[in-house]
Image: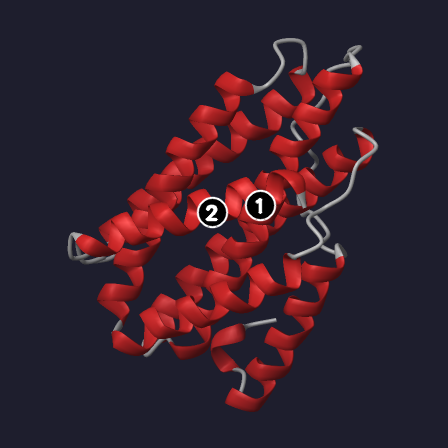
Amino acid sequence: MDIRRLSKFDRALSGIERALGTVSGAAVESRPSPATQPESHLEETQRRHAAGLMRVNHTGEVCAQALYDGQAALARDDATRAHLHAAAVEETDHLAWCAQRLRELDDRPSWLNPLWYAGSFAIGALAAAIGDRWSLGFVVETERQVEAHLHEHLRRLPESDARSRAILQTMQAEEARHASNAQARGGAELPRPIPQLMRFASTVMKAVAYRL
């Protein structure tokens, strides 16, 4: 389906369908999970910790889907919209991989995913309403912060959890590429207070999603 040729109404319906799939856990990956290693034994405390981290990462991918959906909905340029949708395809893979890993760890996604989605969609739409350069700049800053967050989680994962580690390493490389691509397309540098506010919101989300 070529999103660029859809009417606004059709794009709205497609967006609703994507939103329902995202928050209901029905995301389907287009590529197999990079977690090809055999499952290793984790002590119960390690399992709970790994599951908490992967729940945070799953929530982060719910937010990423919502941000891209909100930005694409109000993008002014068809090429920018196509770029956002192409990046969202890889983010859908990340979402599905994290969901699969949570099931393997006998755990669940965040109960607050509908709330995370709604808030992130609104932020993405606001960024797009200001203009495509600022929207792409928001992608750059978001992906830079996600890359740093994944680096932290790779450090905090139990050493023996090779399956979760493989997923996060692949995600980290792809998030860095999304930032580079958005910057190459003309993403503007965000004013100084905005990245700090984004980090604060991310810190709150991570603390809550780890437990809920």
Q: How crowded is the residue under tag 1: few (<14 C-alpha within 10 Å), some, or many (20+)?
A: few
| Position of residue 206 in the picture relative to residue 31 (left or right) | left
Amino acid at the residue labelled 1: Val
Q: How is the image coloured?
A: secondary structure
Q: How crowded is the residue under tag 2: few (<14 C-alpha within 10 Å), some, or many (20+)?
A: few
Q: Residue at x 55, y 29 (%)?
A: 168
Pinpoint residue 24: horizontal percent, then vertical percent.
75, 60
Comparing 78 with 198, the one in front is 198
Could you say which quadrant of the image residue 40 lies in?
top right
Pinpoint residue 52: horizontal percent, then vertical percent.
66, 33
Q: Residue at x 50, y 66 (%)?
A: 119
Q: Residue at x 47, y 53 (%)?
A: 87
Residue 208: image tag = 1
- Quadrant of the frame with the N terminus: bottom right
Q: Residue at x 15, y 57 (%)?
A: 191
Classify 188 as above or below 171: below
Question: What is the tally of numbered marks visible in this picture?
Answer: 2
Amino acid at the residue labelled 2: Val
| Position of residue 141 in the picture relative to residue 165 (left or right) | left
Could you say which quadrant of the image residue 46 lies in?
top right
Pinpoint residue 204: horizontal percent, then vertical percent.
47, 47
User: Is there any visible trace of residue 39 in the rendered image?
Assistant: no
The answer to whether the residue labelled 1 contacts the one labelled 2, judged by CB atoms less than 8 Å apart, is yes
Q: Which residue is mark 2?
A: 204
